[in-house]
Amino acid sequence: MLPSDRAGRPIAVAAGRWAVVTGASAGLGAEFAHRLAARGHHLVLVARRRDRLDALATQLHNDFGVDTLVVPADLTDPASTDLIVTALQDNGIHADVLINSAGFGTARLLVDEDPERVRDEIAVNVTALTSLTIALLGDLYAAEHGVLVNISSTASHQPIPSMAVYAATKAYVSALTEALWQESRASALTVVNLCPGPTETEFFAAAGSDRFRVGHVYTAREVVDAAMSAIDAGTRGPTLTIGVPNRLTALAARLLPRRLGLAVTARVVGLGAATHRPAAAAAGASPLSAVASLKAAGPHNADPHNGGPVNADPDNAVPSEKVNAS
Ligand SMILES: NC(=O)c1ccc[n+]([C@@H]2O[C@H](COP(=O)([O-])OP(=O)(O)OC[C@H]3O[C@@H](n4cnc5c(N)ncnc54)[C@H](OP(=O)(O)O)[C@@H]3O)[C@@H](O)[C@H]2O)c1
């Protein structure tokens, strides 16, 4: 029989079931794997670094007597979801718990970002998380007490200049998971949108930037403790933000006008005034005014060597009403 909480409800994260953890080779994923194994969960461990996963699998089996399945997978690969699902099917495993922890951040001005790395960031943080969630959702709903934890971030609470893509991927994770929380209310599935703030893991090294290390830095154990306790107690809402300071910041982000919020956030991450403002905009002119005056002068006067359009063909000229689009 499952242990129960004070209200007599079964504790959601309990023994003898299979948990799939992505990003299990480090940080929050590895911590979740430990804590779930300590409760008697069998573990499917997913990440790229096979040596780390093998060592963790051996340790969890020796320490807690649980079964483990190691699935090395690069989640930037669109085929990775099928790879994981096939591994589960081949071993007759139905997932009761899914912890989507794999993820990483980039921290540069958008103009300086490496397009390939950003594509990988979106592939791991957004695409893989979404497709694995959908692929395992049937099993999670069928489970007696299914649990889904998607690891988002306090970065999801507001856009972040100099971490624009990371914050946007996490805003996506939060929106997706909160919607799923509502969709799942009539089911036995517990859905948690977990929003840690800065946490001491390999995350900062992987990002190659300390820009993320703002305010109090929690340990992975503190974050996972809080998540497990909230799940045991029965979550009241879709999002679990770790720590009072982070919850206050989230509240401020909701209440502040967007423009002010962005200015405050830029300061917090150490950005000064905008660095890539066109000279015309800085001088107070509309960014569209140069185009408008060009059009007014007519395509024959547009000299590409003086910034005019290369294709100065009157037949291909943009209709004037489009120039004034707002
Ligand atoms: N630490 C923080 O301050 C913080 C704060 C808020 C939210 N988060 C979020 O928490 C989650 C876990 O991060 P963490 O702090 O535990 O960082 P971490 O220690 O760097 O762990 C990241 C994990 O993601 C895996 N991963 C990265 N790219 C992958 C890929 N292409 N394919 C498969 N696995 C991949 C890594 O495994 P391999 O390298 O072995 O593949 C590793 O296991 C992330 O979603 C992160 O955005 C972190």
Image (cartoon, rainbow, N blue to C red):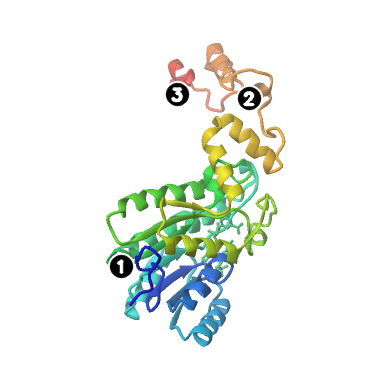
Which disc number belongs to residue 109?
A: none
Residue type marked 2: Gly
Q: Position of residue 311 (x, y in %)?
A: 52, 27
Which comes before the other along the chain, label 2 or label 3? 2
Write down the residue under mark 3. Answer: 316
Q: Quadrant of the N terminus?
A: bottom left
User: Which residue lies at the image location 33% right of the left edge and 65% below the top edge?
Assistant: 140
Asked if disc 1 is less than 8 Å from ligand 1, the answer is no
Q: Are marks 1 and 3 in contact (CB under 8 Å)?
A: no
User: Of residues 148 and 101, which is closer to you in this image?
Assistant: 148
Residue pointed to by mark 1: 139
Counting residues from the start of the chain, the first of labels 2 and 1 encountered is 1
Q: Rounded to the nearest whole Å, what is the CA distance between mark 1 and mark 3? A: 56 Å
Query: Which is closer to the viewer, label 2 or label 3?
Result: 2
Kindly state the secondary structure of the residue where label 1 is placed.
Answer: helix
Question: Label 2: which residue?
Answer: 307
Residue 71 is at least partly visible in this image: no
- Mark in front: 1 vs 3: 1
Q: Are marks 2 and 1 in contact (CB under 8 Å)?
A: no
Q: Is residue 67 above or below residue 285?
A: below
Q: CA distance from mark 2 to mark 3?
A: 17 Å
The kind of residue on which mark 1 rests is Asp
Q: Secondary structure at mark 3?
A: helix
